[in-house]
Image (cartoon, coloured by chain):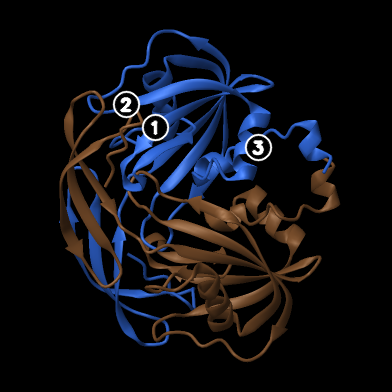
Chain colours: A blue, B brown
Amino acid sequence: MSDDSDDPLAERTLDSRLAFEGVFLRLFVDHVQSADGHQGTREYLRHPGAVMIIPLLDAEHVLLERQFRYPLGRSIVEFPAGKIDPGEPPFECARRELLEETGYTARRWSYLGGLHNAIAYSDEKIEIYLAEDLERTGDATLDAGETLEVFEAPWHQLLEWVRDGSVTDVKTMRGEWPRRPPSDAAR
Amino acid sequence: MSDDSDDPLAERTLDSRLAFEGVFLRLFVDHVQSADGHQGTREYLRHPGAVMIIPLLDAEHVLLERQFRYPLGRSIVEFPAGKIDPGEPPFECARRELLEETGYTARRWSYLGGLHNAIAYSDEKIEIYLAEDLERTGDATLDAGETLEVFEAPWHQLLEWVRDGSVTDVKTMRGEWPRRPPSDAAR
């Protein structure tokens, strides 16, 4: 996967094997040689990438979701998000996911940046978009087995949930940063 | 994994199978029944949890690392972090990782909160600690094959790296929040 001779910390791939291929996840096991000469094993997921959308209803309100997240065994408050389809540009994915999950379209889009969420074992990158000037154009069209609730919340409520530990999804926590209410900026 | 009858979005486990067990990762494939009655598959990792430490050298400087992250094929700037050993309390893990990776101990520790970093396919939770009143008590003692560089950086430099996209590791991005320099708070 890497042979970056300019990086003194780089690890060299000796061999790579697809160890699990499911409907959703692909897990690889590679043998590598580290910079100190030691040989070892690296286990990791290859992920197609994802997007998250921060839908601003107005200056004071956002659209959020409550979705059951099976690995955690409970429902989680988060911004709309989804996996990028093969060959799909990230921005198209963002428009699609916002419409599918919430029924909203946006007239104004801004790209806010990307983040790596699990660098120890996944190459996933999540691209974050701000969606403004929203219009509800229909109902959400979920996949079979996909159940989520969409709700409106004041921006300050999200910040409070992040502060008190009610919101722990890190991409959604990251979503607090484009807007800070006066009370927060003044701290 | 879950049978939370109070949650209208809950998914019910029909069966669960360990599909991959490596040195580092354990991957499960479960059959579930969703709230809409649809039956489907859930693929996910079970993770022992991790810690991240924000080591404050003084009011203006932090300790950071540059570590090769194989899944991304390059070195990443991040705060010290590590996986919790079986039975290890998270705070003990934080003290151990700070010492092992940097050679520093801290006289003052604060727990800043936890985050879930990959809710679609992992139960990993990262607990974040602030370490202050630091003392260098020795050299880092890394595992074989673990190569990283430790360096000091001004706090405002980290904030700048987050803003310009040089730092994309989300746990480290999250680390910007306990302290904001005056120039940032005044925006």
Is the same chain shared between marks 3 and 1? Answer: yes
Q: Nearer the viewer, residue B6 or A57?
A: B6
Q: Is disc 1 in contact with disc 2, using a CB cutoff of under 8 Å?
A: yes
Cα–Cα gap, marks 2 and 3? 25 Å
Residue A82 picture location, percent across and down: 38, 34
Amino acid under disc 2: Thr
- Residue shown at 32% from the left, 49% from the top: A47
User: Mark 1 vs mark 2: which is more N-terminal?
Assistant: 1
Q: Is residue B141 left or right of residue A133?
A: left
Residue receiving disc 3? A160
Residue receiving disc 2? A147
Amino acid under disc 3: Glu
- Residue shown at 43% from the left, 48% from the top: A125
Figure check: A67 above or below A19: above
Residue projecting furthest to the top: A137
Q: Quadrant of the N terminus of chain A?
A: bottom left
Q: Which mark is residue A67?
A: 1
